[in-house]
Image (cartoon, coloured by chain):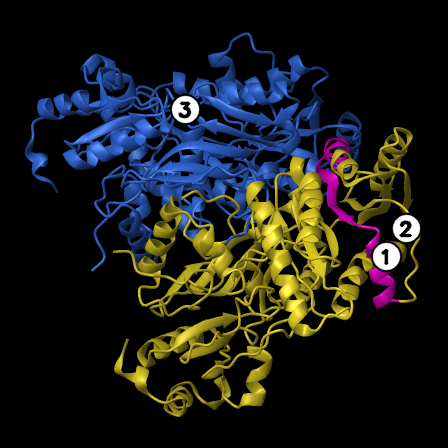
Chain colours: A blue, B yellow
Amino acid sequence: MTSEMSASVGEWRTALRARLGDDLVLSERDAMIPYCRDWHGDVTSDAVAVLRPRSTEQVAEAVKLCRELGLSIVPQGGNTGLVLGGIPDAGQNQVVLSLERMNRIRQIDADDFSAVVEAGCILSELKDAIAEKGMFFPLALGAQGTCRIGGNVSTNAGGINVLRYGMTRELVFGLEVVLPDGSIFEGLSTLRKDNRGIDLKQLFIGAEGTLGIITAVSVKLTPYPDQVATALLGLASLEDAITLFRRARRDCCDLMSAFEFMPPLAFTLAKEAMPDLPIPISAEYPAYVLMEISGSGLVDIDDLMGRFLEVVMEEGMVVDGTISASQAQARNLWLIREGMNEGQAKRGMHLRTDVSVRLSQLASFVADAESAVADAVAGVTCVSYGHVGDGNVHLNVLPTAGATPEQQLEQMYKAKGAINAVLDRYQGSISAEHGIGRLKREDFEARLSPVRRHLLTAVKQAIDPDFMMNPGCQLNFIPNS
Amino acid sequence: MTSEMSASVGEWRTALRARLGDDLVLSERDAMIPYCRDWHGDVTSDAVAVLRPRSTEQVAEAVKLCRELGLSIVPQGGNTGLVLGGIPDAGQNQVVLSLERMNRIRQIDADDFSAVVEAGCILSELKDAIAEKGMFFPLALGAQGTCRIGGNVSTNAGGINVLRYGMTRELVFGLEVVLPDGSIFEGLSTLRKDNRGIDLKQLFIGAEGTLGIITAVSVKLTPYPDQVATALLGLASLEDAITLFRRARRDCCDLMSAFEFMPPLAFTLAKEAMPDLPIPISAEYPAYVLMEISGSGLVDIDDLMGRFLEVVMEEGMVVDGTISASQAQARNLWLIREGMNEGQAKRGMHLRTDVSVRLSQLASFVADAESAVADAVAGVTCVSYGHVGDGNVHLNVLPTAGATPEQQLEQMYKAKGAINAVLDRYQGSISAEHGIGRLKREDFEARLSPVRRHLLTAVKQAIDPDFMMNPGCQLNFIPNS
């Protein structure tokens, strides 16, 4: 803690502007709001300033200055996180450091199946530029038109293609990181295989900015899958969906790229958000699967999907189904899933969870957790959907109609407690893909073993000894004795 | 450093036996030799004792006792490492801790695509047990009949299937680790997706035992690929092999599981080791590719291989080729590759390297490096082969015929210098898959940036503050000021 800690916010702002230049510093309240409000608009915070560097060197300079001034730094990408990891909390000495201006694609090398990109590049822009070269960057998630690759790496983002391509971690060849002392960790290699000892970059992937600021990333590309087959299937139960997944995993081998499940309520919710959306299947089945197979070259994806569905329908594993005959139809099928989410948002405040259990326990977990919610809070509505292949459920809870905001909050709180109690019995994870941030910190800490806490703190102290990086995110660190 | 540091080896042995029991402690020279000699038999070292615990608790007990006594620990799996990471160096106070007795498979869960196994389980035994359940553990390397899974994880082993399934790191769900303070990090989850902040287990993967002792591992399984097509192809150049790889990556999509290159000399060397081995292709082409496609279920692997080869042979990209018509024939094709290695061993001492460059530079690197070797040491023989898809070359060098051992050593030393100088120009890695150990420590340190060294040391100090784990491996740590 330096003597400047007692400086006023005004003095801090003056010092930041003097040293970094006006162009890099926002401090007007209105201009700062988009950087201090979370993606859903649930929380609006405040900051001493928002810094918007244009280069790695400017990030390093900003970090050194903040250290001098005793300011903490909250790194921010596209600010689409769902766990409040990228906006300041109530701390008095926090600046947001936005990477949005560092959005250059440094290189795309189709011959090497690699690309190098700055942290602030918007995911969909990166994907599009890569696709133009006939290549594919597999990370795919709802926020991809707004989120930025640095944030994806910092949070180790998941999404719908994880079952085939892995989490963001598995797509990263290398990182450039500004460390809390202002030094630059230069690791933007595009070597596919490099086994020189401890892999330091792994520490920063998923650290949510608590150990440093990712300024650029080198990523792994695959050939663009120009063949895609998408099917929406009606099943007798979620248990059947899991059996179907296992079968598809074997029958379609490594060509399956998505396998999502949804409840019948998905169609109602999608229609509420998108009244004109065509629903090409009856809404009478207990469970639905949205399945995608994709590939390139000499494999015949349509033929594979056709033969697979023929077998599983003949066996009765799938009761009803529709295969998209065109890209437009496939897009409509995915819109049902997106519409389901928008429909929930339209109904107002609701509980969003992101939990995982073992694949074999997915169906019984959903049944048990939904039943526990019903017992704990009468009348609320559960919407369970997610990524079957990852054992990842988004078990969301909509409050009762007509409840006051206070009643809604209480319902949500009770529902979360009920879900987490069941989850703990299943030894599941409270965060399958969204991270911890500030929203899940308490729930995370409550489940953290002393050995793990000690180790996390030891690593934090080793890399960020003054705890200046993203305080309050992931853990309230207390120094190890 | 405790006062016991001055104890005699005899006193240490007495203390170890007294506290751990005779059953756990080997200290007779003859009994210790297999644990103190490296895989190739190039180096034989010595130890205070070899500890052979039977459980995680016994490992923890041994670690605590060694700490009390001021002894360092060298963890060891199957002792098949190629970089001297698992045998003691000249230090006077080192014990080997062998995991060989912790070889139980704790569970194989085909429904969850997961298994939990103790560190000492031999890789091929694990693979066989998993195959019996219809599943597949993709890690595949020459030493698999002897190496142990804990060692594979500690070294982040590579092998022939990396291009499809990734390094060992990507096959690990969770770890159980005994830390340098004797506490147990319990992380044997089999959740496929768990994004709760910093992923501590990543630190231990590839750390070669410098941060703790991996005692058990949970791993990711895939369906067993019951269809396999293997082809040996003759090409006009290594450049063509790279072009062919890119084409295969797109045309065969994610179903390609191996793509190895070999020089024509491979056949001569294989014949020297295995005189009866059938060689089903002419040895007149400048480059050879051993390619494998595999899968399960409804994909037709033979058909895919047939159609792919038809196209690329028609285009002239492949000049000659043979597809295995049976498992026995496929086995013979792989025996050529193994025979090539055995043939090198039979010729006596030689330089083995394990370097990687960017895929697009593989052919020019091999040409430049072989030419640099020829310039530096007249008359030696280069044998370059490896994993095209990973940009990973094993550029080995055989000494001149009739050279004395001293001359051979000098030739090897000069050849390594020549290769590394070219490699540095290509910004390649001195270790693509074998790790650093003690053999590559100097070469590693010489290329380590101050920022990276500082960070590695900070992490080491955080987790192993007394530097008791595997001293001399990876880095000669000097405490950060």
Query: Residue at position x 20%, y 33% from top?
Result: A66
- In screen coordinates, is B209 left or right of A402? right
* CA distance for labels 2 and 3: 52 Å
Q: Is B350 inside the magenta-drawn segment?
A: no
Q: Can you see residue A181?
A: yes
Specify the subunit that label 3 lies on.
A
Q: Is B256 inside the magenta-drawn segment?
A: yes
Query: Residue at position x 71%, y 63% from top?
Result: B128
Name the residue carrying label 1.
Answer: B267
Picture quarter with the N terminus of chain B: bottom left
Query: Residue at position x 36%, y 59% from top?
Result: B460
Q: Mark 1 or mark 3, which is nearer to you? A: 1
- In screen coordinates, is A450 left or right of B157? left
Name the residue carrying label 2.
Answer: B283
The answer to whether the residues at label 2 and label 1 have Cβ atoms under 8 Å apart is: yes
The relative height of residue B443 versus residue B18 in the rendered view (above or below) is above
How crowded pointer 1 is (Cα within 10 Å; few <14, some 14-19, many 20+) is rated as: many
Where disc 3 sits, the SS reads loop
User: Where does the image place residue A146, in percent across and percent down from the top left?
Assistant: 43, 19
Picture quarter with the C terminus of chain B: bottom left
Label 2 and label 3 in one chain: no
User: Where does the image place residue B118, in percent across and percent down from the top left?
Assistant: 54, 67
Q: Which residues are magenta?
A: B245-274
Find residue A120 and name its label. 3
How crowded pointer 2 is (Cα within 10 Å; few <14, some 14-19, many 20+) is rated as: some
- In screen coordinates, is A271 left or right of B91? right
The answer to whether the residues at label 2 and label 3 have Cβ atoms under 8 Å apart is: no
Q: Nearer the viewer, residue B185 or A8?
A: A8
What secondary structure predominates along the stretch shown in magenta?
helix
Q: Mark 2 or mark 3, which is nearer to you? A: 2
Label 1 and label 3 in one chain: no
